Image (cartoon, rainbow, N blue to C red):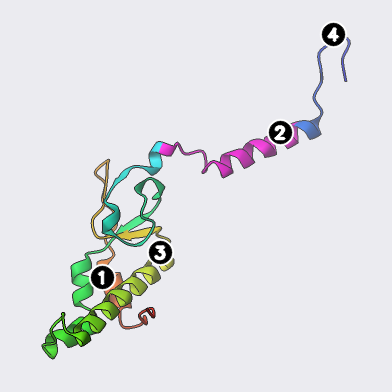
Amino acid sequence: MPSKQGAVRLSPLFLLAAAFAAVAFVVIQGSGRPAAAAASYEAKASHSISGLTDVSQLSNPMAVRYDEVIEATEERVRMRKEKIDPSSPLGEILESAAHRRVSAATRAVMRRDGHCSAWKKIKRKDGRAVPDLTSDVIAQLPVVTPDPE
């Protein structure tokens, strides 16, 4: 409604709706963070164990020393104990089960702690450490069941 001076006066309801629209826009756009903040990690897609593989999408990754975890699986322990050749049919079955068990244990830790992905090698561009949860993943190995093929 125009005032005597010709200026338009905005209603409080309109101002409230505009405020809600601005908040919704910020939430949809990713909490107002610039896109460059998401790309603050360096890693190769081939080093992804579980979760996201595009470095530009990372928000809370974790690192895992994969070789240590795979050696701690019951399948690898059995292969060493019984001297099973990894290229034999039984060795290939056990090796595949070990990889699936590591993936399942890694996903369990990711869900528990709210991580978006797990990586064999990853670093932040600013030099800060990425949390290494190898011991947590190893602790999960006995309680997880390898995913079926």
Residue holding disc 4: 5
Q: Position of residue 61 (x, y in %)?
A: 35, 55
Residue holding disc 3: 113
Question: Going by the image, does 31 lie left or right of 43?
Answer: right
The reply to whether the magenta stretch includes residue 33 is yes
Question: Going by the image, does 69 lie left or right of 12?
Answer: left
CB under 8 Å between discs 2 and 3 = no
Q: Secondary structure at mark 4?
A: loop
Q: Position of residue 101 (x, y in %)?
A: 31, 77
Q: Secondary structure at mark 3?
A: helix
What's the residue type where badge 1 is placed?
Ser
Span shown in magenta = 15-35
Q: Secondary structure at mark 1?
A: helix
What number is the disc on residue 18?
2
Name the N-terminal-most of marks 3 and 4. 4
What number is the disc on residue 135?
1
Residue drawn at (36%, 42%) of the image: 39
Q: Position of residue 128 (x, y in %)?
A: 26, 46
Residue drawn at (29%, 65%) of the image: 133
CB under 8 Å between discs 3 and 1 = no
Name the N-terminal-most of marks 2 and 1. 2
CB under 8 Å between discs 4 and 2 = no
- What is the crowding at mark 3: few (fewer than 14 residues within 10 Å), some, or many (at least 20)? few
Residue drawn at (15%, 80%) of the image: 87
Name the N-terminal-most of marks 3 and 1. 3
Q: CA distance from mark 2 to mark 3?
A: 36 Å
Give the residue furthest to the top.
Answer: 5
